Image: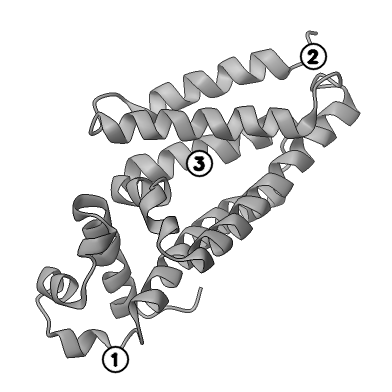
Amino acid sequence: MDITKRQMEIVQAAIQVIARQGYEKLTTKNLANSLGVTDASLYRHFDSKKDLIKMILCYFEHLSCEVIQQIREQSLSPLDRIRRFVNNRYEMFAREPDLAMVMFSEELFKNDPSYAEYFQGIMHIHRDEVLGYIMEGQHSGSIRSDLNPLHVFRIVVGSMRLLVTQWNLTKGAFDLLGEGKLMTETIIRLIEVEK
C-alpha cells in the first residue's frame, strides 16, 4: 500500500472520528481539530473526503491481503487456514476497535454506492480465498463434502461479523479474541470430518 506516514495518521484519525462520532461528523474541521492542524493542510494529503474514505477501505484491504499472503506462504491444512484467517480478523479488530466499528458500520456504505462497491470487492477476495480453503478441505476429506462451500463460508464469516458487532455494541465488554477462537473451534467441529 502506497501511503505516507502523515496520510496514515490522517486515516487513523478519520477512523477514530467515524467510529466515535459517526460518518456525518467526519468533516475537515473535526478531522483537523483531532490532528491539531489546519483544514487546509489536510488537502495536501487527500483531495476530498471521498478519497480519504477510499484510503480507509484500502487500508483494510491491505491488512486483509497481508494475512492472506502469509497463509499462502505457510504449509497449513485447510482447517488451519480457516482458523488463521478468522482468528486474524479477531486479532486485528481487538487491536483496532475503531476499525471494527467502521468496517461493520452500515452508515459508511449507505452514503456512497462506490464505497459499498469497493467493500464488496474486498469481501469477494475474502470469499474466494476462504471458499478455496473449504473446497480444498472437502477434496482432501478433512471438511464434510455434504455441505455447500458457500454456506460454510457464510457461517464462518457471518458468525464473526455477529460476534464483532456484539463486542462493538457492548463497548468491548468481553474478550473478543478468546470468544472468537472458541467460536472458530465450534465451527471447525461442525464442518470437520470425524476421524
Instruction: Look at label 2 and name its amino acid.
Output: Val
In the image, residue 178 sits, relative to residue 50, either above or below, namely above
Q: What SS does tag 1 mark?
A: loop
In space, the residues marked 1 and 3 are separated at their CA atoms by 34 Å
Q: Position of residue 123 (x, y in %)?
A: 60, 51
Instruction: Look at label 3 and name its amino acid.
Output: Asn
Q: What SS does tag 3 mark?
A: helix
In space, the residues marked 3 and 2 are separated at their CA atoms by 24 Å
Report the number of numbered marks: 3
Assess whether mark 1 and mark 2 are in contact (beta carbons under 8 angstroms): no
In the image, residue 181 sits, relative to residue 13, either above or below, namely above
Residue at far right of view: 139
Q: Is residue 15 left or right of residue 27?
A: right
In the image, residue 85 sits, relative to residue 151, either above or below, namely below
Q: Which mark is residue 88?
A: 3
Which of disc 3 and disc 1 is earlier in sequence? 1
Assess whether mark 3 and mark 1 are in contact (beta carbons under 8 angstroms): no
Mark 1 vs mark 3, foreground winner is 1
Other-residue count near label 3 (Cα within 10 Å), few / some / many at <14 / 14–19 / ≥20: some
Q: Quadrant of the C terminus?
A: top right
Residue at image coords 29%, 24%: 174
Assess whether mark 2 and mark 3 are in contact (beta carbons under 8 angstroms): no
Residue that badge 1 annotates: 44
Which of disc 2 and disc 3 is earlier in sequence? 3
Q: Position of residue 89 (x, y in %)?
A: 48, 41
Q: Nearer the viewer, residue 21 or 42?
A: 21
Residue at image coords 66%, 13%: 189
Residue that badge 2 annotates: 193
Instruction: Look at label 1 and name its amino acid.
Output: Arg
Residue at image coords 44%, 37%: 90
